[in-house]
């Protein structure tokens, strides 16, 4: 008599965990680089920290590009994390699908808002 421990799970693909892990690490590196660049600009700037300093930091094209990449990286990072949470803790398929769609809609809305603010500067 054989004993079967755990559930029988059909795996539909390979390396999904590795891809998610790599995405999380890659996006974290981009966000870390952005944080370091922002802190360096604030620390090494002359004058008081105010609107003029912040507007000057984000006026440079390279900073806008880095901010653009960071917003995309943040949204992707959040999506991978929340998708994994929904998949692990919400067993009902329909509810999980609704939560994932709402998460995507919220992330797209936040990203669109961030781009609108970024390019208005």
Image: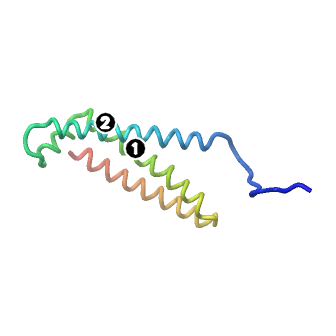
Count the numbered circles shown: 2
Q: Residue 87 — which label?
A: none
The residue under the point 36% across, 39% down is 69
In x, y percent, where is residue 30?
38, 38
Along the viewing direction, whichever of 112 and 70 lies nearer the viewer: 70
The residue under the point 92% across, 56% down is 1
Q: What is the crowding at mark 2: few (fewer than 14 residues within 10 Å), some, or many (at least 20)?
A: few
The residue under the point 31% across, 50% down is 114
Residue labelled with disc 2: 65
The residue under the point 32% across, 53% down is 113
Side (left or right) of 20 relative to 32: right
**Element class at badge 1:** helix
Q: What is the crowding at mark 1: few (fewer than 14 residues within 10 Å), some, or many (at least 20)?
A: many
Quarter of the image with the C terminus in it: top left
In x, y percent, where is residue 40?
22, 36
Mark-to-mark CA distance, 2 and 1? 11 Å
**Element class at badge 2:** helix
Residue labelled with disc 1: 72
Determine whether label 2 and label 1 are within 8 Å by CB: no
**Residue 104 sits above or below residue 55 on the image:** below
Along the viewing direction, whichever of 90 and 62 lies nearer the viewer: 90
Side (left or right) of 13 relative to 119: right
Side (left or right) of 114 relative to 2: left
In x, y percent, where is residue 41?
20, 37
Residue farthest toward the top in the current orientation of the protein:
62
């Amino acid at each position: 008599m054989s004993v079967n421990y755990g559930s029988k799970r059909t795996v539909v693909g390979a390396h999904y965990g590795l891809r998610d892990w790599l995405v999380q690490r890659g996006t974290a590196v981009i966000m870390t680089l952005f944080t370091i660049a922002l802190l360096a600009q604030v620390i090494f700037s002359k004058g008081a920290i105010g609107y003029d300093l912040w507007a000057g930091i984000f006026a440079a094209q390279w900073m806008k590009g880095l901010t653009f990449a960071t917003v995309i990286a943040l949204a992707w990072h959040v999506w991978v994390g929340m998708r994994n949470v929904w998949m692990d803790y919400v067993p009902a398929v329909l509810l999980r699908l609704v939560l994932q769609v709402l998460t995507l809609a919220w992330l797209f809305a936040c990203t669109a808002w961030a781009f609108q603010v970024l390019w208005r500067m």
